[in-house]
C-alpha cells in the first residue's frame, strides 16, 4: 500500500514588509485583500498543526498543489522554500505552482529556481522551468505527474491555463506509465472541471485537459485553488477518474470556507485492479487538534472497467 498526502493553498504568512515600488502592480490588490480579510483567516499555527498531524500519518509521499505564497515577493518565495524543507526530503515532496506563486511577471521563474528540487522529474535532464512541465516522478507503484496551470494574470483575475505545449507531453507520460502498470496521479492547481470555481478563477483549457484524460487515462487527479474539499469525476480511458480538491491548508476555523484539511490517499492493488481510499483530516474547531473528518473508497479493486461513453 502507498500512502499519498495532499496539501494545497498554504498561503504562508505573515506578509513581509512591502515597498511602494513592489505595490506598483497587481500586488496592490492582493495587499489590500490580505489586510482586509486573508490575514484574519490564514494562520501559521493552523498550518503547523495540520503538518504535524500529516507527518504523524507517515505518508510515503506528499503532494502540494500550489499557492504556497500570497504576493510572490522574494522573501515569501524564500520562506516557502524553508517551509518545504521542513515538510520532507525533496524526493518525497512534489509541488506544482498556483496562481499566487506566479502572481506577477517573473515570479514563476523565481519559484522554479528557489523550489527546484521539489518541482522537477526523476530524469537527470529535467530542468525546473515552464518548459519542464509536466514532470514525472515514479515512487513504488505510483506515477506522479505535475502539471502547471499558473500564469500571471490581470488584477482581480485568478485564472489558470492548460495549453497545447503541455498536452502532448502529458499524453506521452500517461501512455508510458500505463504500459508500466503504474497508478497515475495528475497534480495541478486549478480544478479541471467546469463550474468548480467562479469565472474569474476558472481554468482555461478544461476541454483540452479532459480530452487528454479521456484518451490516455489516469487513476486520480488532485487539485487546490477552490479552498473546498470537493469531489468530481471526469471521463477516463478505462472509466471515471476521481478529481479531488482540498480545503486551504492555512484556513482557520470560523470562516466562510471549511477549515484547514489535508487528504490522505491509500493506494493498493495492481494495474486494472486498483483500490483507492480517501481520508480527509482537518479542524473542526478553534481549540481542537486535527481529526479524521471522513473516509470513503473512491475505487474498489476489480476487473478493469470499460471506457465511459459521452
Image (cartoon, rainbow, N blue to C red):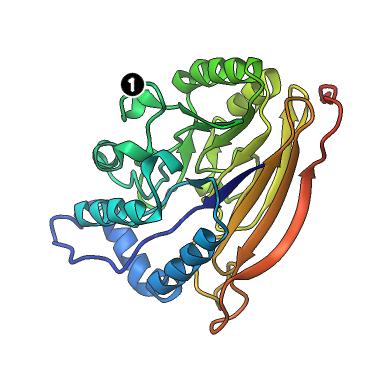
Q: Residue at x 60, y 34 (%)?
A: 185
Q: Position of residue 102 (x, y in %)?
A: 33, 43
266, above or below 86, in the image? above
Q: Position of residue 142 (x, y in %)?
A: 59, 32
Q: Residue at x 55, y 15 (%)?
A: 172
Q: Quadrant of the image for the N terminus?
A: top right
Mark 1 neighbour class, 10 Å CA radius: few under 14, some 14 to 19, many 20 or more: few
107, above or below 246, in the image? above
Q: Which of the two residues, 289 or 162, is positioned nearer the viewer here?
A: 289
Q: Position of residue 15 (x, y in %)?
A: 27, 66
Residue 297 appears in the figure:
yes
Residue assigned mark 1: 124
Is residue 282 found left or right of 16 in the rendered image? right
Q: Quadrant of the image for the C terminus?
A: top right
Q: Residue at x 38, y 70 (%)?
A: 44
Is residue 244 found left or right of 80 in the rendered image? right
Which image quadrant is residue 240 in? top right
Amino acid at each position: 500500500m502507498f500512502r499519498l498526502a495532499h496539501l494545497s493553498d498554504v498561503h504562508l504568512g505573515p506578509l513581509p514588509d512591502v515597498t511602494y515600488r513592489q505595490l506598483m502592480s497587481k500586488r496592490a490588490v492582493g495587499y489590500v485583500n490580505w489586510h482586509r480579510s486573508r490575514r484574519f483567516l490564514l494562520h501559521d499555527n493552523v498550518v503547523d498543526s495540520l503538518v504535524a498531524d500529516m507527518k504523524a500519518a507517515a505518508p510515503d509521499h506528499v503532494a502540494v498543489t500550489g499557492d504556497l505564497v500570497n504576493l510572490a515577493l522574494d522573501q515569501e518565495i524564500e520562506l516557502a522554500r524553508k517551509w518545504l524543507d521542513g515538510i520532507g526530503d525533496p524526493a518525497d515532496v512534489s509541488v506544482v505552482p498556483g496562481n499566487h506563486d506566479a502572481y506577477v511577471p517573473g515570479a514563476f521563474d523565481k519559484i522554479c529556481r528557489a523550489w527546484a528540487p521539489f518541482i522537477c522529474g526523476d530524469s537527470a535532464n529535467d530542468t525546473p522551468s515552464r518548459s519542464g512541465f509536466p514532470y514525472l516522478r515514479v515512487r513504488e507503484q505510483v506515477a506522479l505527474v505535475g502539471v502547471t496551470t499558473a500564469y500571471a494574470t490581470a488584477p482581480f483575475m485568478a485564472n489558470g491555463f492548460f495549453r497545447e505545449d503541455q498536452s502532448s507531453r502529458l499524453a506521452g507520460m500517461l501512455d508510458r506509465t500505463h504500459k508500466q502498470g503504474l497508478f497515475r496521479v495528475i497534480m495541478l492547481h486549478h480544478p479541471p472541471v467546469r463550474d468548480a470555481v467562479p469565472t474569474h478563477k476558472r481554468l482555461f483549457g478544461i476541454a483540452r485537459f479532459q480530452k487528454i484524460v479521456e484518451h490516455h487515462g489516469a487513476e486520480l487527479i488532485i487539485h487546490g485553488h477552490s479552498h473546498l474539499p470537493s469531489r468530481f469525476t471526469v471521463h477516463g480511458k478505462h472509466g471515471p477518474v476521481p478529481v479531488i480538491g482540498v480545503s486551504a491548508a492555512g484556513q482557520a476555523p470560523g470562516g466562510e470556507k471549511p477549515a484547514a484539511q489535508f487528504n490522505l490517499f491509500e493506494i493498493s492493488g495492481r494495474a486494472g485492479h486498483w483500490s483507492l481510499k480517501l481520508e480527509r483530516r482537518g479542524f473542526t474547531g478553534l481549540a481542537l487538534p486535527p481529526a479524521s473528518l471522513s473516509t470513503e473508497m473512491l475505487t474498489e479493486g476489480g476487473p478493469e472497467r470499460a471506457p465511459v461513453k459521452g
